[in-house]
Amino acid sequence: MKKTFRMIDLDCANCAAKMEQAIGKLEGVTAVNISFMTQKMTLEADDERFDEIVAQAVKACKKVEPDCQVVVK
Amino acid sequence: MTRKQKKTLLRILLAAGLLVLVWVLEPDTAWLLPDWLSWLPLAPAAVSQNGAVARYAPGWLTGAAYLIPYAVIGWDVAWRAIRNIKDGQVFDENFLMAVATVGAFGCGEYREGVAVMLFYQVGELFQSVAVSRSRQSIAQLMDIRPDYANVERDGTLVQVDPEEVAVGDIIVIKPGERVPLDGTVTEGTSALDTAALTGESLPRDVEPGQEVVSGCVNLTGVLRVTVSRPYEESTVAKILDLVENSAAKKAKAEHFITKFARYYTPTVVFAALALAVLPPVCKLADDALGLGLLPSLGPGEWMMWVHRALIFLVVSCPCALVISIPLSFFGGIGGASRQGILVKGGNYLEALAQVGIVVFDKTGTLTRGQFAVTQVHPQGMTEEELLTLAALAEQWSNHPIARSIRSAAPENLDWERAAGAEEEAGHGIKAVVDGCSVWVGNDKLMEQAGADWERNPGQEGTVVHVALEGRYAGWIQVSDREKEEAAQAIRELKQAGVRRTVMLTGDIPAVGEALGRKLGLDEIHAGLLPQDKVTWVERLLEEKKPEERLAFVGDGINDAPVLSRADIGVAMGAMGSDAAIEAADVVLMDDDLTKLSAAVRIARKTLAIVRQNIVFALGVKFLVLALSAVGLANMWMAVFADVGVSVIAILNASRMLGKIR
């Protein structure tokens, strides 16, 4: 499954790169892209564990930049 | 400015004010104070008038005073540094700035410590504003998303979200409104402004039966349109999706920079550590062993080395590069989309800048894809008579050639004049016009008619011979006309640095070569079957120079295999054609070939800016690193090398947002 999330207050381009790296290492993630310019994260991961992976990804983002919010609809 | 940015601005002003205040209270500037405040200075004795014994206030007091502005401006940085270390993110910019400024305090350079933090925040604020500005202006470029659709329900008009409109619904588009969904006009005529999609400023006229494309603006009349596709599949949704996702396909330069940043920061931090520790330790060891190889460690030298190391830390943040490069690519993609050129990713923009070979499909790309009568050579009658005869005989045929002859014939023909048409498959048509037998077709048919026809007269298209009552009446040449701007577009490509232009066509060699020569193409390969085109592209791919890229330009309809085989597949005239948007890497929304050279120019400019930014930012950083290692740089230079460079790089990148012609 592939889904796009909006990110609020993603302030630093280097952080986006770091988040991308961290999420890419999560199990079950096939592809991830964080665009600093569009403030969006596109995550592609296993269908069955998708929600769980999203939660992990959000956590990974928080770790890099605690002020940044991922809008999970 | 967002609220966060405003808050930062306030803090910057406050901290700057406090910094100036504390500075004024320092001994060497305290004379600025009026008399009645003379009790205030931190070191009152230092300015005592008779030059009495200098009695400095204790250093910690000055330090403590400077801590106030420092806390105002830097508390969040320090806090984030601590929090991030806890999370295992050691080398982030917060940490670097915190260490550098705290280090400066440790060295007794309070003023520098606060100022570095202050400038860092100013730079960050500036960056944040500049980035959100360019983000907004790019968003404006893509402001083609329709807000609502007027749907007719139970006889009244209701405004609904375009996503809620079903296929087959009738929508009403008033002048000034954006076309919300793709559909077919059922009522009304109007002119549509397609500029947002194609960059073409000339409005397009529509009338009942014609298709309208979402994203255009209705200019003059009210239109009633039957919706043909749901919103998710509409042109506008596809384009928005494509542009927004283009950031996902990163260019090599972007990958390089993220990789570089990953190694750069830790390397500089360790270099700083080494710089702070190694020289003094070496000197101490030298002294202790009595070797006398190095001058002995002077008083305060530890501090000096630590100070130099701190400068390293300030310079070690890679943000200037990491921000400005995707910004340049994004700006390039945004600027291109405003002209109706959709680039599906930074990597394609990069490839486009390196394009050395451009391969064109002929029909529909270099030519209009519509047949038209280009030459009429009657024998023993007027041109009009010849066309009339041919049109009357061919009136039942649906072949493109027959259609083009009909549209070239005089208007208001009495179609009843012809009868008894007989098609000779592959050769032409026999018919009776005004009671006389008429043959319209190729050489074989002329032979049958027993006419003495002219052999191989035309060179640039299909020739149709006409015989009347067994006598040769002349020939009509039908050909696909080249696009008016094709020759100019090829010239522009050459100017933009394209080395080789190649045309591939399934047409007969004589026709292909005549067109190719006329347009100034370097190579023409005609008489090809669809699979031969792939083979040719593969051969050309082998022949290209290693740093070159090959682009294939087609109409995207039946050349998908070639489009995907080339380094860059460019589809033209894609407005409304899903297949083309899907198959290509670069999509030209309208038929204008000069957009191709515009795309190459935009790509080259983007890459030039990217290169400038990399060289400039790295150059300044390495220069300051080198200078500070030998003690020639100060904190101010370091701050410039960090935030100053970022700001300049961002401003440079935002040049991409301007219009390039």
Image (tube, grey):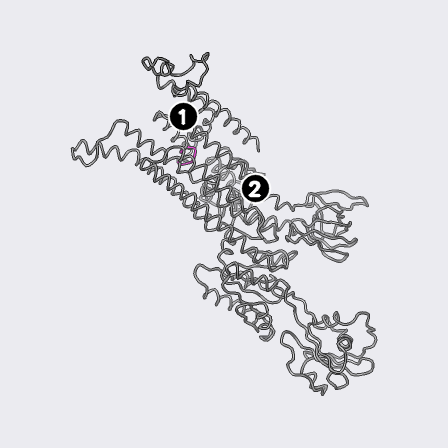
> What label does residue B135 carry, if any?
2
- Point out residue A40 in the picture as x, y percentages from the top left corner: 54, 42
Looking at this view, is B467 or B459 the one in front?
B459
- Point out residue B627 in the picture as x, y percentages from the top left corner: 34, 38
**What amino acid is at disc 2?**
Arg
B407 is higher (above) or lower (below) than B434: above
At horizontal 75% and vertical 54% (from top left) the residue drawn is: B185
B9 is higher (above) or lower (below) than B596: above
Tell me the chain of label 1: B
At horizontal 63% and vertical 52% (from top left) the residue drawn is: B199
- Looking at marks 2 and 1 on the same chain, the residue that comes earlier in the sequence is marked by 1
> What label does residue B334 carry, if any?
none
B97 is higher (above) or lower (below) than B414: above
Dividing the image into 4 quarters, which one contains the N terminus of chain B?
A: top right
Mark 1 highlights which residue? Answer: B111
Crowdedness of circle 1 by 10 Å Cα count: few (<14), some, many (20+)?
many
- The reply to whether label 2 and label 1 mark residues of one chain is yes
Q: Is residue B109 magenta?
A: no
Which image quarter: residue B572?
Answer: bottom right
At horizontal 70% and vertical 51% (from top left) the residue drawn is: B193
